[in-house]
Image: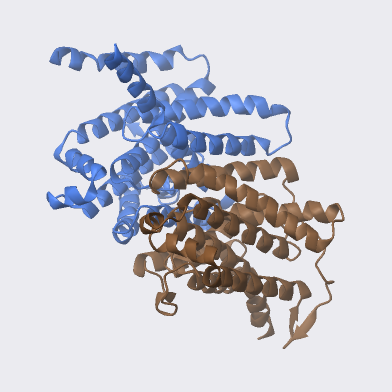
């Protein structure tokens, strides 16, 4: 039984290894890379929503800081890629702790308001601080990540890097939920007062998981910037934060498998919507996405609050118990 | 001096609208426990619908009443989607309202396009001068209408039986239910009232500041920030907070640059959230009930 449980991991690994080779075009590889990166951002938010009962509308900003910190350090200050990546993580974690510490003592929605404010402020800075960020025109010439003389400079190599990163984050989150910290988080998500009475540091654990969600977003943002070599503020607006929320909601909170599923579903849906809105006036693309994503949020929260994965799993298990 | 005064006067008019949005936000929050992210949708729709009515040459008073009724209907729909399906108000209702505001932005785009829209002011655009600052008649209309609405809302909650029932819900939902108050009906009243006042606020400000399909963002954000000044629960402090933010926002826009009005509001909101989550004006107006 234990062996089967271990072997089960091999199937997705084989899929991950073969998938990039099967994809027909560099465009498809780009979509796969983006799905992988955003699945990690969504995973961070899922952990926060599922276990701390908090919602952040600033994941797009953390993602953006990961991208811009790496890009600015590497392009303007010639910091080598890996130290720049680490610096971005440290900056994001520090911001998360500064915002989170006072806010997370309060009730559930205060963090939503604070991170919304944070997200809009950061997006404005990306746009306005042109000397540092290149403003609305964006920032180019961002170096790829490399190991020795092996540079992640092609679509295929970046697809593998992003997949590997997403898988690593998934395993990390999965294992963390089975550790002491994970059990504490599960306890506090079930009942805060009960968990506190058993000695769980409620505010502390919420704060750590908020910082962890920021770190997940930061790493994904750095890989995003290093892959595309060019970033502009559009990619890190408040709409990106909402998109991540849609991914997490579709995938389902409190299951790590929901993140890649939600991310893939939203990217594929986006491509489909772009196909539909081709004939409509300019600007309709984003607007059509807004309407559809908004409706998805409403429908999922009312009918499938556990998300698609949980919804389908519980459907399966309820059928099994009935038979 | 006159330029500062100019910013302050415009700021008070804009801030009065923010204050009304903040008031609507607090009413909904107190009665239902829902943080309504779609609060900016009401004035946005109110503004757009008035533009359409003005284009159809409807008499002004009739247009405003119809506008308020239509948007109140939207508010009731929001209530049905964000309050009724959930047993307790936590994260899911908040996400529902976020989804609704997103969808309505998109719908407004397809109905009214992306250009800023406006309609003629109520009584001409001949500016009066006050210490060297220009005051437009519409500015006075905005301030007058907002004051009237705040007084009416206050009177409703303080002097009518129904208003007191809504306030009972705000104080303690479970206890209100125990003594036979229909909590769901009160939730609908809160959403309807909040939407109608929001719509009127949007209608009166549109001749001064044209409305676009993304207007709801800055209205909602400043409304939240204003409400945070009252610790989310104190209605009159929320109105005061909204007016303050309007003035600060205009000064920031004038002296730092376009787009910084929102940043100023949000920085203030973050500072208040982090340092005094119970609100800054909480001691000024100590009553916790709705109005």
Residue A211, horizontal then vertical, whole percent: 30, 48
Q: Number of labelled discs?
A: 0
Residue at 37% over, 68% down: B278
Q: Quadrant of residue B30?
A: bottom left
In the image, residue A232 sits, relative to residue A106, either above or below, namely above
Q: Is residue B209 visible to us here? A: no
A187 vs A149, nearest the viewer: A187
Residue at 75% over, 79% down: B134
A168 on left or right of B38: left
Quarter holding the N terminus of chain B is bottom right
Residue at 32% over, 49% down: A87
A304 vs A155, nearest the viewer: A304
Quick one: which residue is furthest to the bottom in this view?
A: B131
Residue B264, horizontal then vertical, whole percent: 52, 66
In the image, residue B142 sits, relative to residue B129, either above or below, namely above
Quick one: which residue is furthest to the right in this view?
A: B57
Chain letter for brown, please.
Answer: B
B275 vs A9, nearest the viewer: B275
Residue B73, horizontal then vertical, whole percent: 64, 49
Q: Quadrant of residue B247?
A: bottom right
Q: Colour of chain A?
A: blue
The colour scheme of the drawn protein is: by chain
B44 on left or right of B19: right
Q: Is residue B238 visible to us here? A: yes
Residue A101, horizontal then vertical, whole percent: 29, 59
A263 vs A106, nearest the viewer: A106
């Amino acid at each position: 039984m234990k062996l089967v449980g271990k072997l089960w991991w091999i199937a997705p690994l084989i899929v991950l290894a073969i998938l990039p080779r099967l994809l027909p075009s560099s465009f498809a590889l780009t979509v796969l890379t983006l799905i992988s990166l955003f699945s990690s951002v969504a995973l961070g938010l899922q952990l926060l929503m599922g276990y701390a009962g908090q919602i952040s509308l600033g994941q797009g900003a953390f993602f953006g800081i990961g991208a811009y910190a790496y890009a600015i350090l590497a392009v303007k200050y010639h910091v080598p890629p890996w130290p720049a990546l680490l610096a971005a993580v440290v900056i994001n974690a520090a911001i998360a702790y500064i915002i989170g510490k006072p806010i997370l003592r309060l009730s559930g929605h205060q963090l939503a308001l604070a991170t919304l404010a944070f997200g809009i402020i950061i997006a404005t800075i990306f746009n306005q601080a042109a000397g540092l960020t290149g403003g609305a025109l964006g920032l180019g010439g961002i170096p790829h990540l490399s190991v020795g003389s092996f540079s992640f400079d092609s679509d295929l190599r970046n697809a593998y890097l992003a997949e590997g990163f997403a898988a690593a984050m998934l395993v990390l989150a999965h294992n963390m939920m089975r550790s002491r910290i994970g059990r504490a988080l599960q306890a506090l998500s079930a009942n805060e007062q009960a968990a506190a009475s058993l000695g769980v540091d409620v505010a502390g654990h919420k704060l750590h998981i908020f910082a962890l969600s920021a770190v997940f977003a930061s790493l994904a943002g750095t890989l995003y910037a290093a892959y595309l070599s060019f970033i502009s503020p559009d990619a890190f607006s408040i709409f990106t934060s909402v998109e991540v929320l849609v991914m997490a909601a579709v995938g389902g909170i409190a299951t790590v498998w929901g993140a890649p599923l939600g991310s893939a579903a939203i990217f594929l849906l986006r491509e489909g919507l772009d196909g539909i809105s081709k004939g409509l006036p300019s600007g309709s693309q984003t607007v059509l996405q807004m309407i559809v994503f908004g409706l998805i949020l409403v429908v999922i929260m009312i009918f499938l609050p556990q998300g698609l994965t949980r919804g389908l799993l519980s459907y399966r298990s309820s059928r099994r118990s009935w038979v | 001096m006159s330029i500062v005064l100019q910013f302050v006067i415009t700021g008070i008019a804009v801030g009065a609208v923010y204050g009304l949005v903040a008031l609507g936000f607090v009413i909904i929050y107190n009665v239902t426990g829902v943080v309504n992210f779609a609060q900016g949708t009401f004035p946005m729709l109110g503004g757009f619908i008035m533009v359409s009515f003005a284009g159809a040459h409807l008499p002004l008073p009739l247009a405003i009443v119809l506008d308020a009724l239509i948007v109140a209907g939207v508010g009731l729909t929001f209530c049905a989607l964000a309050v009724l399906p959930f047993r307790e108000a936590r994260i899911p209702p908040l996400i529902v309202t976020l989804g609704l505001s997103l969808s309505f932005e998109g719908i407004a785009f397809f109905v009214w396009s992306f250009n800023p829209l406006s309609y003629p002011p109520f009584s001409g655009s001949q500016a009066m001068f006050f210490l060297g600052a220009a005051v437009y008649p519409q500015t006075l209309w905005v301030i007058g209408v907002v004051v009237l609405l705040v007084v009416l809302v206050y009177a409703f909650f303080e002097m009518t039986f129904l208003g007191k029932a809504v306030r009972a819900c705000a104080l303690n939902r479970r206890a209100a239910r125990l003594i036979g108050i229909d909590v769901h009906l009160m939730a609908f009243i809160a959403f309807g009232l909040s939407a109608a006042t929001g719509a009127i606020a949007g209608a009166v400000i549109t001749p001064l500041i044209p409305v676009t399909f993304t207007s709801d963002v800055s209205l909602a954000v400043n409304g939240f920030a204003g409400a945070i000044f009252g610790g989310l629960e104190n209605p009159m402090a929320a109105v005061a907070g909204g007016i303050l933010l309007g003035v600060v926002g205009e000064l920031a826009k004038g002296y730092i640059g376009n787009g910084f009005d929102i940043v100023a509001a949000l920085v203030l909101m973050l500072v208040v959230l982090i340092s005094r989550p119970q609100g800054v004006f909480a001691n000024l107006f100590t009553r916790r009930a709705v109005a």
